[in-house]
Image (tube, rainbow, N blue to C red):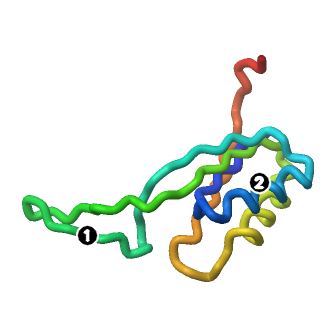
Amino acid sequence: MKQVIAIVKPFLAERVLDQLVRQGFSDITVREVRGYGRQKSYLSEYRENDYSVVFLPKVEICVWAEDGQVKSITETIIENCRTGRMGDGKVFCVDIVDRVAEF
């Protein structure tokens, strides 16, 4: 079993969720997150260190699926989120070693 984690722009998250649900994936968690990276957030100098003043809003989508479904999930996320501009997002895939409990 694997967990696919996608960090995407907020206005694209609903489109991704609709497509994932249409494909039959139901084990999905969504949360609002903030971050910065190469998308040129505003930097300021504080005590000789640069720090980001603006954290851009993003949405984290977590999907749990069987190993054979990961390719379909990642393709769906990429197809619906890629605009070709910096800051589109990231997709991670993590092995689930042990499922402790399901309730």
Give me the residue at 8% from left, 59% from top.
47
Marks 2/1: CA–CA distance? 33 Å
Quarter the N terminus occupies:
top right
Quarter the C terminus occupies:
top right
- Amino acid bearing label 1: Leu
Q: Measuring from the top left, give residue 46's x and y in whole percent.
A: 12, 61
Query: Can the viewer see residue 15?
Result: yes
Q: Residue furthest left?
A: 47
Q: Measuring from the top left, give residue 52's x and y in whole percent.
A: 29, 62
For residue 30, which quarter of the picture? top right
Label 1 environment density (alpha carbons within 10 Å; few <14, some 14–19, many ≥20): few
Q: Nearer the viewer, residue 78 or 13?
A: 13
Regarding mark 2 in the picture, which secondary structure is present there? helix
- Amino acid bearing label 2: Leu
Q: Nearer the viewer, residue 100 or 22?
A: 22
Residue 36 placement, left or right of 100: left
Label 2 or label 1, whichever comes before in sequence order: 2
Residue 15 placement, left or right of 40: right
Residue bearing the label numbered 2: 17
Give me the residue at 74% from left, 18% from top.
101
Residue 50 placement, left or right of 42: left
Label 2 environment density (alpha carbons within 10 Å; few <14, some 14–19, many ≥20): many
- Which mark is drawn over residue 43? 1
